[in-house]
Amino acid sequence: MNLLTQKFTTKHDTAPFSGIKTEDFLPALKEGIEIARKEIDIIVNNPDEPTFENTTVAMSYSGDVLERASGIFFNLHSAETNDEIQKIAVEVSPLLSEFGNDIRLNKALFERVKAVYNNKANLNLTPEQTTLLDKQYKSFSRNGANLPEEKKARLREVDKELSKLSLEFGENVLAETNAYQLHITDEKDLSGLPEGTIEAARELAKDAGKEGWIFTLDHPSYIPFVTYADNRELRKEIAIAFGARAFRGNEYDNREIVLQIVKLRHERANLLGYASHADFVLEERMAESPVKVKTFLKDLLAKAKPAAEREFAELTAFAKEVDGIEQLEKWDGAYYSEKLKQKLFNLDDEKLKPYFKLENVLNGAFVIAGKLYGLKFKEVQDIDKYHKDVTTYEVTGEDGNLVAIFYADFFPRKGKRNGAWMTSYKSQYVKDAINERPHVSIVCNFTKPTETKPSLLTFNEVTTLFHEFGHALHGMLADTIYPSLSGTSVYWDFVELPSQVMENWCYEPEALALFAHHYQTGEVIPIEYINKIKESASFQEGIATMRQLSFGLLDMGWHSEDPSGITDLKAFETAQFAATQLYPDVAGNAMSTAFSHIFQGGYASGYYSYKWAEVLDADAFEYFQEKGIFDRETATKFKENVLSKGGTEHPMLLYKRFRGQEPKPEALLKRAGLL
């Protein structure tokens, strides 16, 4: 009996992690596929006329066993992987892709869906039901259901190949990240580094059975090193290693994989009748088309570039004055920016970190969610977890009813990928009159507590935690009927609004007073620090904007044109970066070979959405500021029209219902000091 395919008997139906063995996954996923196939067969072979209930609704609830098992598996593949799990992923990804195609290319099933869709006008559907039907019909038509047989067969091959390549891409990046260590044995090479970073490096060395200190390409180690280490040669070494990941001509080189991925994506779009992968993707986004996205990015670029060039000139002059540096290089950027920031604002992360003990910051996010949305978070010990570092919470509303289960996983470890993300183990939906509540998780990579110090966050990490928590609220407060429209299942360029808007509270004195207390003395963060955080928030915003725009333009470069003529990844990338380049190029480095967002995650043709969502979030938060940042009425409007609605209606409709108008880019430019 496989635990993963049975109904869970755990508290709140949570994932029974401790009972699952790695060898359970493959049979469970195969069985899940078979169960889902049978559910689809029942719909297809129903002798009754196709109706919304027996076709659309039946399909929306099918495959739930597979959904849960694969959700658990792929979440562990990101957060707690090992060689065995990676092997299973390679074996199972093509099977899942094949199964997905079996459904989307199932002619008889499509005929039923089409019959309901063509009769839509007579069905008197709610907006949510209409969206479900539209989405279902499009999931067929946009995936080849209207194609002739030979093109359908080719589509299957392409999809199978793509799922394999994106896994390989991610595993190569992880292998390259893990392969590098900067081993320091001379204490003077630690000059400039914060005490906590040094201590963490000593523990890494101790774990590896070595003397001295070890620094890695994991963010909690890499970022402080390039930001604070006085030794320029060592900054150069680690920065070049970071930029050379999967670009070193070894077995983990991703160059060929990138070229194959973009060519296959382009071929797939053409098969389906679209001019490019970006045209295909953007049809289902707020932005609608590559032309609109490029106009949006170039418009922002025109506004940000003068500021960025001014800031870069200022930084260059500063580095020359301080250290006689003639030419600023990429490994100098974070270092001199931090020094200049300290000079201008007399504010550095080391001063701020004592006020941002991880537990306090997390509790602050909980208190703010309580004030805005009436939520309560209670840590519980009787919910199973996949690693001892994970903490689990029951989330309840003001009526005391369960709203969600929340998992938090904060520290780096060997089997966990870099970065920060939100995910879920179970979606919210309503079935048989029961509102099934969601199980949501946030995963980050913050500095671990040491023998002498708790985990103290940089201000940047504080905003990261709030960002992922914003995504989590979108999942937790979901209140829709169908699982495929629930929580974060929204247009991709809308999904960052709840996360990015949440970051704004980190800059508000009223909010900081709730959680920014010195971990030793309990003293609240001084008001002059808060003022400086706010002042420095737009410090080098021009440079930061250029960086984001460069990634967005590179993404559109790969995906909005025919890539078949591209043979040299590096040369192509250099051309894409021309309009946004500030630092001299580093010959042995490439961005694309480790650009996991677009070659492993779901951001292909969607990287622009960070900036797009910033426009939404700046505009939305301006509304909160007008009414008061804890104004319950405004929060309720946001919850009822945005957070709880998932993907049940077009996002612009939802946004306008909350805000009363379309978002204005001026709010972002004003906040960023670019006006």
Image (cartoon, rainbow, N blue to C red):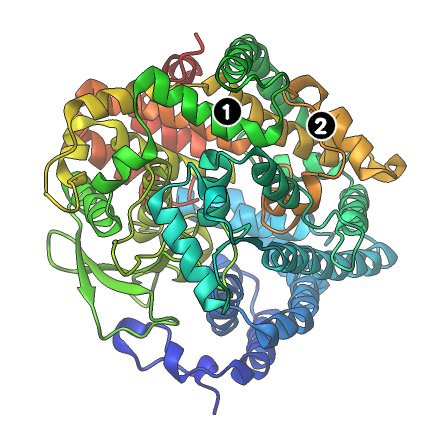
Left or right of 257: which side holds 451?
left
- Give above or below for 616 relative to 395: above
Image point (24%, 33%), residue name: 637
Left or right of 482: which side holds 34?
right
Splitting the image into 4 quarters, where does residue 393 fall? bottom left
- Label 2 crowding class (10 Å Cα cut-off): few <14, some 14-19, many 20+? few
- Give above or below for 22 relative to 616: below
Residue of label 2: 585
Query: Residue 221, position in %: x, y?
Result: 47, 48
Query: Residue 198, position in %: x, y?
Result: 40, 49
Splitting the image into 4 quarters, where does residue 164 fall? bottom right
- Label 1 crowding class (10 Å Cα cut-off): few <14, some 14-19, many 20+? some
Q: Point out the frontmost of discs 1 and 2.
A: 2
Image point (21%, 39%), residue name: 355
Secondary structure beneath dot 2 equals: loop
Secondary structure beneath dot 1 equals: helix
Residue of label 1: 544
- Give above or below for 430 relative to 128: below
Q: Amino acid at mark 1?
A: Ala
Image quadrant where one finds the C terminus: top left
